[in-house]
Image (cartoon, rainbow, N blue to C red):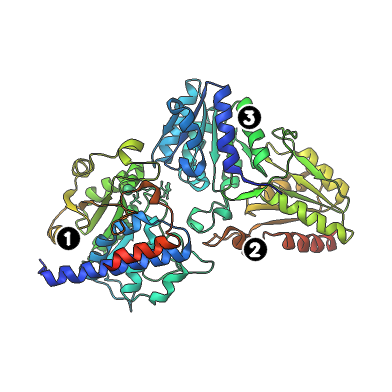
Amino acid sequence: MKQIDQQQVQRLQEKAREVRRHIIAMLGQAGSGHTGGSLGAADIVTALYFWEMNIDPNQPDWADRDRFVLSKGHAAPLLYAALAERGFFPVEQLQTLRKLGSPLQGHPDRSKLAGVEASTGSLGQGISWAVGMALAGKMDRKDYRVYTLLGDGELEEGMVWEAAMAAAHYRLDNLVAFIDFNGLQIDGPVKQVLSPLPIPGKFAAFGWEVLQIDGNDIRQIMEALDCARVVKGKPTAIVARTIKGKGCSFIENKVEWHGVAPKGDEIARALAELDM
Amino acid sequence: MDKQATRDAYGKALVELGKQHQDVVVLDADLSKSTKTADFAREFPERFINAGIAEQNMIGMASGLASAGKTVFASTFAIFATGRAFEAVRNSVAYSKMNVKICATHAGLTVGEDGGSHQSVEDIALMRSVPNMTVVVPADGVSTGRALFALYESKGPAYLRLGRPAVPVIYAEGSPFEIGRANVLRQGKDVAIIACGIMVAKALEAAEQLAEENIQAAVVDMHTIKPLDETVILQMATETGAILTVEEHSIIGGLGSAVCETVCAHHPVPVMRMGVNDVFGQSGEPDQLLDYYGLNVEKIVQNVRDLLRKK
Ligand SMILES: Cc1ncc(C[n+]2csc(CCOP(=O)(O)OP(=O)(O)O)c2C)c(N)n1
Ligand SMILES: [Mg+2]
């Protein structure tokens, strides 16, 4: 187990705030993109990139690195913010998001940007990539770990459950899947559109270790990652309750903020709230 | 010139269709605001089913509903309708000739900023290759509405390809539209530009410019890719002796390929295909992308000049 002290927690909270500022700034500049789902999962991705994962921005292809797959690929701004802050590319490049010729594609493109492990954006496919990476880790007797992040709406894809079955069948204890349980998708609350509930019970029935946490609480995320590290013989699902849009009051929990970027004074308001 | 997105026209026409016919059922996969089926959902909530983010199941359910007598319109983005759900479309819908109309929006490069993962440039090829499938690619809002009503009348599997951005309205309200019959929008003896979808308006503009250089270009709106209007193609081949095809789709397997197959078999003439040259798209503004991938008026004009040299 890693030691979790209050200082580390604070450092990560500050980092998550910085990541959120980047998200707002880059989406504002791009004029389109997915704000809610990027902000809401910022604490999870920050904990992974700045505490949990064994990675080296100077060697993005290092064979022994831990891997992260953003299965909910529409949260690309979050991934880019974390990669830039972690030193994979200059922070200034974030301003090219979604522009012609930019390696920062609307959805992550592995062939265009070092640090992006899997090209995602078609929901349900990322977790299968992650299962494949975890399988390769077992084959090669390496002890790298694989992390993935799924949306709760994304769980409606059948492919997610095919991957879940495979991960348990192959006893992939080197795999951790976060479920960003914000209760919302595009057409409304997940409960109304097509309920994937109960989420923990489903993963448990598929043979996964299941943890339930507040996904906007950095300490709980760290503790869950700690627990997952000692699970043997099965993959771990961390069902993380989050607030979609977390950090900007007027974006929080609003379904209409799924796929729009902040404009004009919304940008200033959001940044001001994140500075407080 | 008025502009309207074909997806907007689809949403409106779908509500009209729902008013006229009780058997119309609409399915979507968590994109109803974008595909515009939300209009129908508001009007007829009891005849709208949200499949959630589960495109394969949506297509499977569509077949089941159709087998029970419903006329089903199933919508999501083109990449997911024809890509993710391809084999369900083939084996559940087309194989059994189910009365399912797959009305997919956000086709082609003009999806824009979402990037290459979301830009389907293969969907016409995929859908055209499936037996029993009718494939329609309307050029504007007016013909989208007409196409939808025509597809309702023609029972059986169909694919309707729609776009995201507003595009020029080129047809007058009430202009003729018949599935499988191309519209010759402009006569010309030197070359025929055969286009579909949003490229038709650009072809018309190019023909206008070419006329100033004394090049008379015919323009054909090949809105139905399958069944293909071979009569018009062969008539164009005979009358002009050179054909340029233009589509917002890969040059492999789409309109250009279909035209080549017909011309090759029955009346070989030089054909040049304009489309996406076997590459994936990327993020950018829709118009920027069309320019970048060479799908603009200037390129059409230039290609016609080049093509004429081969005649
Ligand atoms: C296969 C597929 N179908 C549809 C979409 C369009 N889409 C993008 S995001 C989204 C909703 C996702 O909801 P959720 O997984 O809950 O994500 P979050 O709330 O975390 O943003 C949809 C339907 C897609 N990207 N991929
Ligand atoms: Mg969600």
Label 1: state its secondary structure.
Answer: helix
**Kind of residue at badge 1:** Leu
Read off the residue under disc 2: B291
Contact flag, marks 1 and 2 (Cβ < 8 Å): no
Q: Is residue B158 left or right of residue A59?
A: right
Q: Is residue B140 left or right of residue A140?
A: right
**Residue B244 makes an appearance in the image:** no
Mark 2 closeness class: few <14, some 14–19, many ≥20 residues within 10 Å: some
Label 3: state its secondary structure.
Answer: helix
Tell me the subunit letter for badge 2: B
Q: Is residue B80 left or right of residue B214?
A: left
Distance, label 3 to label 2, CA atoms, is 33 Å
Q: Nearer the viewer, residue A115 or A92?
A: A92
Tell me the subunit letter for badge 3: B
Label 2: state its secondary structure.
Answer: helix
The answer to which quarter of the image holds residue A41 is bottom left
Q: Residue A127, how many percent across, how many down?
A: 32, 53
Question: Mark 1 against mark 2, which lies toward the viewer?
Answer: 2
Q: Nearer the viewer, residue B9 or A107?
A: B9
Distance, label 1 to label 3, CA atoms, is 55 Å
Mark 1 closeness class: few <14, some 14–19, many ≥20 residues within 10 Å: many
Quarter of the image that includes the N terminus of chain A: bottom left
Q: Residue A143, how many percent across, how many down?
A: 21, 66
Q: Nearer the viewer, residue B19 or B219?
A: B19
Question: Mark 1 against mark 3, which lies toward the viewer?
Answer: 3
**Kind of residue at badge 3:** Phe
Q: Kindly identify which numbered label has been placed on residue A225.
A: 1
Q: Kindly identify which numbered label has been placed on residue B149.
A: 3
Distance, label 1 to label 2, CA atoms, is 47 Å
Mark 3 closeness class: few <14, some 14–19, many ≥20 residues within 10 Å: some
Q: Is mark 1 within 8 Å of ligand 1?
A: no
